[in-house]
Image: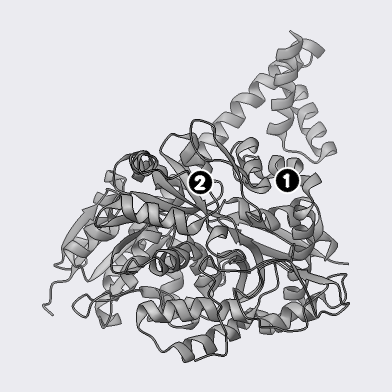
Amino acid sequence: MSDRLSIVVVEKDRERALLIVDSLRASGDHEISVISEQSGLARRISERNPDVVLVDFANPSRDMLEELTLASSPLERPVAMFVDRSDDALTRAAIEAGVSAYVVDGLSAGRIKPILDAAITRFHMFQAMRAELAATKRALEERKIIDRAKGVLMKARGLDEDAAYALLRKTAMDQGRKVAEVAEALVTAAGLLS
Amino acid sequence: MSQTRLTLGYIPLVDAAPLIIARELGFAEQEGLAVDLRAAPSWSTLRDMVALGQIEAAHMLAPIPVAMAMGLGGMATRLDAISVLSVNGNAVGVSMQLARKMRDAGHDFGFADATAAGRALIAAAGDRLRIGVPFPFSMHAELLYYWLGSLGLEAPQALDVHTVPPQQMAEAMAAGDLDAFCVGAPWGSMAVENGAGELLLPTSAIWSFAPEKVLAVRHDWAEKAPDQAARLIRAMWRAGRWLADSGNRITASEILSRPDHLNLSAELLERSLSGNLMISARGEQRRAEGYLEFHRGAATFPWRSQAGWIATRLAARTGLDRAQAREAARRVFRTDLYRAALDTTAADLPGASEKLEGALDVPTEVASQTGSLILGPDRFFDGQIFDPDAE
């Protein structure tokens, strides 16, 4: 086996794939390719005959890769999921980060670790970014709906802004619900009544 | 009683119903279990989640724990099947083009005769039949190999069996990547609905009592927490009994159809639960007896002979030692835990833990704890009998 490893990254999202490829390049001189098509995935991979396959843990097409774990002829190299040969901590880190790695039988853990470390960082970073974006978006939406609910209360009950918010918060606490939920219910009801 | 919190994983299919019903109708709560459900995007991810301890138990293809015990596939942790969750429930479908060819050649799409359907399929398929299954280790794959192999097709060599996620099956067929598929409910009906194909045969016409999904847990979890395992088995058993009552079908399909569960039309799900299937876009209806069983005929009993059949088939096509494979498989179907868990309930359990698979042609009374257990027919379409003790 030569020093260069061939790595296939299965990823539909182009931006994300580029991020992962960049970080893999930084971890060593490897031959890296990206597959973004889902159809015929197992065939596409076996044509390239890679040493390592990296794929999102949550990718529905992952089952297609399981076919590769069965070597159907002596010439084909069986591929195993990385988790059954590595140290536990690395495995857990990979799964937490959402990476599953398929590795050709017989490849030593020492050679895979830097690659997996690099992939983990990237997968992790991307996931964190996505979660952050979703959380920010949700917070903004909640704020908008609470503002509208405050407006409804101010108009209907002649309250000032602070009193309107206090009433929303008290109702939410009494009912064991979130302020945003109470606000949403109020806005919906007000819309129906107007 | 304080509630024990458990997370159960599943793939959004009709036969995940026992897990969903056990939670939604309080059968789990009744056992002191607070159940969180987590849908998984693929079988390999679900298997890894349970093997790595992210979840306690999972809805799983019956051959997966058997394959793992034989050292096949990507993950080596031992999983145990503590209960069968459902019997049968898959359907074979063909592309519109292949269906037309088969009809032109005189096949009636009767949806019952596996020999006639198989011969018509082989005749129409040309030299290489491309079939999609949801996973390499699945009853879908094993039953296809068994069926077409028994009809003279050299399986697996003459077949191109590919793994395609169920949601992508209709798409792959429309794109011309597949000639046929074998898939679980409701994805067969979905392919008909989308005009991607027609249904040819329920897999119950190949083996009339095939274990389909099991409840899989880590072996060491079952050893460490036998009480929790027992409570899970009882909750699933009660959910299965509720599902088997035809009066509950509408309610069951409504619950399953909700956005946080399968998120599909209740009418479509009801077809699979009732066994009244629409097989073509022209609206042709067929009734499949025993299409999907959750309870009747001791459906959830994890017969060691069922594990033995799966292991024998897997060993034959992967070139492993059959006797060793069978021995490993028998250990993962935990008849012992299942019996212990249901000992205190109204469940009537069979006296034996193994049987000749394929020997019952008609519903038959068998020796059981209270003497009134009737097992349904379990015959193979070609009349073969599998003896778990034979060499």
Residue of label 2: B187
The residue that appears at 72% across and 74% down in the rendered structure is B229
Q: Which mark is residue B278?
A: none
Q: Residues within 10 Å of mark 1 (few under 14, many from 20)?
A: many
Quadrant location of residue B196?
top left
Side of A76 relative to B162 (left or right):
left
Question: Left or right of B38: which side holds B176?
Answer: left
Mark 1 — on which chain does it sit? B
Q: Which residue is mark 1?
A: B252
Q: Tell me which residue sits at (17%, 63%) in the image.
A: A48
Label 1 amino acid? Ala
Q: CA distance from mark 1 to mark 2?
A: 18 Å
- Is tag 1's residue or tag 2's residue first in the polypeptide sequence? 2
Furthest residue in direction front, as rendered? B106
Taking B187 as reference, is B381 above or below it?
A: below
Front position in the image: A186 or A154: A186
In this picture, is B380 found above or below B188? Answer: below
Q: Secondary structure at mark 1?
A: helix
Which residue is found at the position 81% from the left and 38% from the top?
A: A173
